[in-house]
Image (cartoon, grey):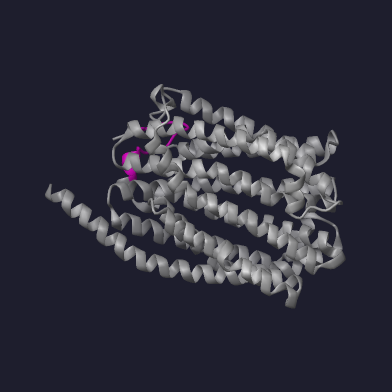
Amino acid sequence: MVSDKISKGRSTVSTDDLGKRTIGQLLLQYSLPAIIASLATSLYNIVDSIFIGRGVGAMAITGLAITFPLMNLVVAFCVLVAVGGATISSIFLGQGNAEKASKVVGNVTILCLIHALVITAVGIIWLDPILYFFGATAETIGYAREFMYIILAGTPITYVFLGLNNLMRATGYPRKAMISALLSVAVNIVAAPVFIFVFHWGIAGAALATVLGQLSAFIWVLAHFISRKSEIHFSRRSWKIDRAIVRKVYAIGLSPFLMNCCACLVVVFINKALLDSAGPLGNIAVGAYGIINRSSMFFVMIIFGITQGMQPILGYNYGAASWQRIKETLSKGIWLASGVSLFGWLASELFPDAISAMFTTESSMIEIARNGFRIFFLFYPLVGAQIVIQNYFQSIGLPKLSIFLSLTRQLIFLLPLLWLLPPHYGVDGVWIAMCSSDFIAFVIAAVTAIVMNRRIARKLNLMKANDRKS
């Protein structure tokens, strides 16, 4: 088995301990760094939006909101490789196959670069038509275009950083993965106000700060996998494309890929519904949704931190056929994530104006956001459990179920509701559609987990019994 006992700056346990230590200890070790990193990223996104809103203007906030669908699409092609690679590397380690886990590193890097170059080229060539399709208007296209040109140019750096950072966490280095994320955020938060308020580079300054932060983290994770001190690292064999590994990466990564693609499509429909429903305040309503979306993602990113910490534990123990440890990990993850989403609901219900006022002084935007917060977050306490269950199936190598659960929340129910409700309820209909789909998706996820866990338990217990006999 892989052994990466450590001292400073690395994991305090070996990957073997994913099958031995208590689940509480492992979640603390793996999830806490991921939560801290996700929290830092969320804070950066919020602070960056505040800098843009305060330093550039209300229309810049709307321009930034218009880029969300394209950003989701860009991220989708990265997580397709990053999450799939992280999951199969954990499963290989659970099976005691360190050599294959090392091959994943090189294959993931190559795939990330290929995806990044294609996305950059396509995005830059057709940027304006894409942004207009996503809801840009004459007042907002300039801001959106200026921001995305720079983000797209930095995509190769971003993809390799995110791909390797996921592998770093999955192969036993959660603290180093946390440090890389914190490094990116720290550079970003320092550079953004300088570029915006001192150099007066506007929204382009925010984009440049983002790329600069990711470049620093890219150097950090690259150094880790180049070093021979790392048990899983680059080698000559790792640079040879392994078709079996690539197929598994894509099969498992398809779930988060589709989730981000759905998020892209959904934001397009939401933006268009708001533009149609709000009349002359359409751009203001889109900006209000941008504030709500940023605030929601703050809590969702913390939940993703929990699921990232769960992933190596689930993957390893699934590879080792340890059902009881899988069940305990899922249960604890659901409780943690539900606590986070409950806190998000309380904050949005009690302090909607205070949250909006951080981003803008535009009174009409604050007013629209106030109502949006209170309706949008109505069933938010259930969102944490739904996300954990969805990522659970992905982590144990059942991507089809994960894809199905992702589609229920973001596509299957939300799009019909966005078509039906806004014509009758106006802007409120948009918020009602989103909270209703959250509730339905939770119910379906809970039922799916109950039914499938019975089958998974029987399968793994049988495998364990056969292993003992042999």
**Is 455 or 387 nearer to us in this picture?**
455
Q: Measured along the vertical axis of the image, is residue 410 above or below residue 57? A: below
Which quadrant of the structure image shows residue 346?
A: bottom right
Which quadrant of the structure image shows residue 243?
A: top left
Q: Measured along the vertical axis of the image, is residue 390 above or below residue 277? A: above
Q: Residue furthest bottom?
A: 424
* Position of the N terminus by quadrant: top left
Residue 131 image position (x, y, % from top left)? 75, 48
Residue 463 in sight from this viewpoint: yes
Residue 470 image position (x, y, % from top left)? 12, 46
Relative placement, left or right, of 383 versus 246 is right
Q: Is residue 326 magenta?
A: no
Residue 348 image position (x, y, % from top left)? 67, 65
Q: Is residue 17 magenta?
A: yes
Relative placement, left or right, of 22 versus 335 is left
Q: Residue at x 16, y 52 (%)?
A: 466
Q: Measured along the vertical axis of the image, is residue 430 above or below residue 332? A: below
Magenta: main secondary structure equals loop
Q: Number of labelled discs?
A: 0
Give the magenta part as a residue range: 4-18
Relative placement, left or right, of 298 versus 10 is right
Q: Residue at x 28, y 61 (%)?
A: 457
Residue 310 image position (x, y, % from top left)? 43, 51
Residue 193 in sight from this viewpoint: no
